[in-house]
Image (cartoon, coloured by chain):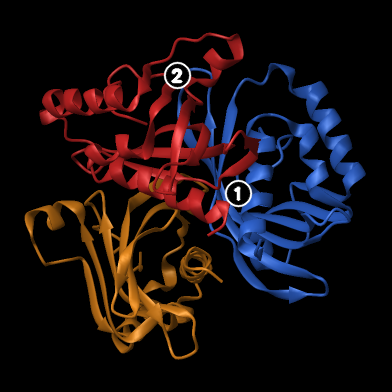
Chain colours: A orange, B blue, C red
Amino acid sequence: MDLTARLVELNAAYARALDNEEFERWPALFAEACLYKVTTAENVARGLEAGVMYADSRAMLEDRVSALRRVNIYERQRYRHIVGLPYVMGAEGDGHRVETPFLIVRIMRDGTMSVFATGCYRDLVAANGAGALSFRERVVVCDGGRFDTLVAIPF
Amino acid sequence: MDLTARLVELNAAYARALDNEEFERWPALFAEACLYKVTTAENVARGLEAGVMYADSRAMLEDRVSALRRVNIYERQRYRHIVGLPYVMGAEGDGHRVETPFLIVRIMRDGTMSVFATGCYRDLVAANGAGALSFRERVVVCDGGRFDTLVAIPF
Amino acid sequence: MDLTARLVELNAAYARALDNEEFERWPALFAEACLYKVTTAENVARGLEAGVMYADSRAMLEDRVSALRRVNIYERQRYRHIVGLPYVMGAEGDGHRVETPFLIVRIMRDGTMSVFATGCYRDLVAANGAGALSFRERVVVCDGGRFDTLVAIPF
């Protein structure tokens, strides 16, 4: 399977885990030592390191999921990720730098839908022990910057 | 051509037939004996079988298109399907189970655009006699649940 | 790499150049003699040739980018292209006719997001001297028709 097909597979699994609310499947898509960060294009342009979400290991992502399961019981909106076409920037070590645009729609309980976020995933992907691709880095660069109510949900 | 590329081809043909209003091309993407159903995530979660649209053969899909052609003359909105990345769940018989997210934008006659529906296609695909993939099942699971005016349009 | 993967690569590079505002990368994706046009489905249906943007060479695209850089300094909205799955219509000469749906979200400075445009890219692609695919034709057929304020931005 070529790199494009493997990137499709990885990104499709990512979106599916989140949208099906199978959050426990989400950390498994990352390497054990990893970088996961949610930030904005404006922060990146200004050189600001701070983001709205940060983790540097799969264990931290698992903690996040546990917290989400405790806190989020009454939250009834759903999300739908539409992941665009991956752009391979080039090889880096035994992995690849990739940028992939995304769009997230939020669906409220009454059926109202709206564009919740758009942006670009800036990834470093590499084969894990089992030969499948996983994320060593996924930096989620959001185009907009209003995330007041929803910081608990992975992007 | 690998499975990912063939799924891209099938889903692109599906979206194109609907968005170009070449509805007659739509049934040909299904097997003769097939399941096509439009339902909601809420119905699926509750175990409800009922959907807003149902067909169990290509002939029923063709009837639907004929009805659409008769009824729908004055309807002037357009739709645009953005189909996301397919996720292959696994093999089943000589086919594959696949889940693919989608987003449908509705464009009104005055140019107003809005997110009309999002959701996930839950498919069983297999090669037809000609070697191309077709749908044995396509269950359209919509995230929201308001379809009052538009049940006539395939998703 | 098969055609689907190459189309993914080309379309991903296109979207990325525009959304990252690396406009100078955009003309390089076209052949030197090329057709680039932005029009609407309504114009196409009526057989009208006129579009909201037109170029028939890479040099004209480069001029357009230069103009954009001069005029557009104070424009602060961002755009995000989500390019759908490419549909290969067939071979033509040493190239291929392809149709690919797209969705563009506009992000205002205050973070407000809205669907700005949807439509279909009608392309003729062929390998350039370096072996990569480039556009001989890209006709951008927009579903809606209100482009009053933003004709300067490539679609």
Q: Residue furthest front?
A: C129
Residue under label 2: C145
Q: CA distance from mark 1 to mark 2?
A: 29 Å
Would residue C25 be visible to someone looking at this image?
yes
The subunit letter for the residue under badge 2 reads C
Label 2 element class: loop
Q: Which amino acid type is marked by label 1? A: Gly
Q: Nearer the viewer, residue B136 or C60?
A: C60
Q: Vertical placement of B61 versus C152: above or below?
A: below
Q: Is residue B67 left or right of residue C40?
A: right
Q: Vertical placement of B133 versus C114: above or below?
A: below
Residue A135 percent location from the top left of the image: 36, 76
Residue B145, labelled with which disc? 1
Residue placed at 43% from the left, 77% from the top?
A26
Q: Quadrant of residue C103?
A: top left
Residue A1 percent location from the top left of the image: 56, 71
Q: Quadrant of residue A64?
A: bottom left
Residue B24, labelled with which disc? none
Q: Which amino acid type is marked by label 2? A: Gly
Q: Is residue A71 left or right of residue B149?
A: left
Bin the neighbour count of mark 2 within 10 Å (Cα to Cα): few under 14, some 14-19, many 20 and up: some
Would residue A123 be visible to someone looking at this image?
no
Residue placed at 23% from the left, 52% from the top?
A146
